[in-house]
Image (cartoon, helix red, strand yellow):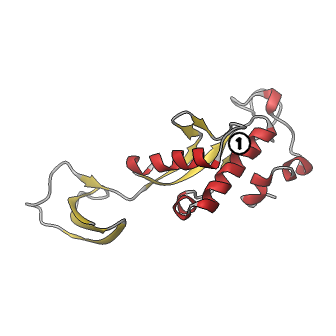
Amino acid sequence: MSATIIARRVDGDRPVRVVIAGTTIASVEPAGEAETPPDVYVAPGFIDLQINGYGGVWFSDAKVTPEAVLGVLEAYPAHGVTRLLPTVITGPLEAMCQGLAAVRQACEREAWAEHMVAGCHVEGPFLSPEDGPRGAHRASTSAPADWPTSRRCSGLRAIGLN
């Protein structure tokens, strides 16, 4: 399947013709001003640096599965997001580890998911227990940095933190 999109580049309003062959952009060429719709724009894929989840799936849930992660990832291209960072937030270490492991397993199963996941955004649990620097993170799940504790989490090892 192939398609041609005539639009304006978002980075300068220049008219272009984008030829798509299957799932690949085959070419981007200048287009004529007269053939270009005034209100249709093309842009590079967006990169979302913090995705906590989507559609009822939470990456910090102790029960999140690789299948659920894939379901979340599948939804983002429709919104122009081509790369993202699944985020786990400060919480019980087991839940954080499960979230990271589920992301890792999803990426190991599907090459497109591995390409889409640029890395993982890990917030905590190693945050200051003091009010103020900790921000919105709960004191009850924050802890001082602890290497042996971090080594318990295979998800952290998978993203190179351990």
How many residues crowd around disc 1 within 10 Å: few (fewer than 14), some, or many (20 or more)?
A: some
Question: Residue at the location (67% across, 49% down)?
Answer: 102
Location of the N terminus (image quadrant): bottom left
Location of the C terminus (image quadrant): bottom right
Question: Residue at the location (15% across, 51% down)?
Answer: 38
**Residue 125 seen by the camera:** no
Question: Residue at the location (54% across, 63% down)?
Answer: 115
Q: Quadrant of residue 114?
A: bottom right
**Residue 131 seen by the camera:** yes
Question: Residue at the location (10% across, 60% down)?
Answer: 35
For the residue labelled by badge 1, is the local secondary structure a helix, a strand or a loop? loop
The residue singled out by tag 1 in the image is 123
Q: Nearer the viewer, residue 89 or 33?
A: 89
Q: Residue furthest right?
A: 148
Tell me if 76 is positioned left or right of 59 in this view.
left
Q: Position of residue 50 (x, y in %)?
A: 57, 45
